[in-house]
Image: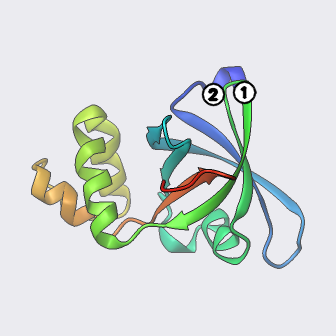
C-alpha cells in the first residue's frame, strides 16, 4: 500500500504494549524534515489512541512512506512544540486543521493563535530515523 499512501500519509508499524504483537496504523504526516530524516504525526484521538499509548511503552517502530521503509524512534513533543507544529500545519492544510480541532472539541477561530492553543492540547509525536542526531 506504500505507493497509495503518498507523502502525506504513512504506515506506522509498532509493538502492542500488552500483547507484544506487531500493530499497524495509517497516520497523517503533519511535518517532514528530510534533512534530519524525521516525520511528525498527531494523535487525532488524543493520548488514548492505542498507537500513541503503544509508542509511549515501546518507542521503536517502523514507518513506510511511499515505497520507503524507515526504522524510527518516537519522541513526544512538548505542548509548546506542538503549538508551533500546529501553527505551521494549519495554513498548509486549513480544512484538515479545522476538522481536527472540531473532532477533538478544541475551540479554534482560524487564527494562528487559536491553532497554537489547539496544538498545545494535541499529542504530537516526532518519529526520527535511527542513527540521526539533533532532530
Q: Observer-nearest residue: 38 or 103?
A: 38
Q: What kind of element bears circle 1?
A: helix
Classify 46 as above or below 114.
Answer: below
Q: Residue 65: x, y in percent?
A: 65, 32
Classify 111 as above or below 56.
Answer: above
10 Å neighbourhood of mark 1: few (<14), some, or many (≥20)? Answer: some
* Residue at (59% x, 24% y) in the render: 6
10 Å neighbourhood of mark 2: few (<14), some, or many (≥20)? Answer: some
Q: Distance between the Cα atoms at labels 1 and 2?
A: 5 Å
Q: Identify the mark at residue 126; answer none if there is no mark.
A: none
Q: Residue 28: x, y in percent?
A: 52, 42
Give left or right: position of 94 versus 74: left
Classify 114 as above or below 25.
Answer: below
Quarter holding the N terminus?
top right
Residue pushed farthest top? 3
Q: Residue 85: x, y in percent?
A: 32, 52
State the scheme by which the image is colored.
rainbow
| Quadrant of the rendered image containing residue 115 | bottom left
Q: Which residue is mark 2?
A: 5
Q: Residue 35: x, y in percent?
A: 48, 36
Residue 63 makes an appearance in the image: yes
Classify 75 as above or below 127.
Answer: below
Q: Observer-nearest residue: 21 or 38?
A: 38
* Residue at (37% x, 57% y) in the render: 103
Q: Which residue is mark 1?
A: 2
- Contact? badges 1 and 2 (CB < 8 Å): yes
Amino acid at each position: 500500500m506504500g505507493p497509495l499512501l503518498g507523502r502525506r500519509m504513512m504506515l506506522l508499524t509498532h509493538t502492542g504494549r500488552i500483547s507484544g504483537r506487531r500493530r499497524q496504523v495509517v497516520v497523517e504526516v503533519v511535518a517532514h524534515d528530510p534533512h534530519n530524516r524525521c516525520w511528525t504525526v498527531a494523535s487525532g484521538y488524543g493520548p488514548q489512541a492505542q498507537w500513541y499509548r503503544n509508542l509511549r511503552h515501546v518507542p521503536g517502530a517502523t514507518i513506510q512512506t511511499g515505497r520507503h521503509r524507515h526504522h524510527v524512534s518516537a519522541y513526544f513533543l512538548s505542548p509548546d512544540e506542538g503549538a508551533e507544529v500546529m501553527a505551521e500545519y494549519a495554513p498548509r492544510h486549513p480544512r484538515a486543521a479545522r476538522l481536527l480541532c472540531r473532532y477533538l472539541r478544541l475551540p479554534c477561530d482560524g487564527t494562528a493563535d487559536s491553532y497554537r492553543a489547539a496544538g498545545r492540547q494535541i499529542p504530537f509525536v516526532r518519529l526520527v530515523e535511527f542513527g540521526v542526531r539533533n532532530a
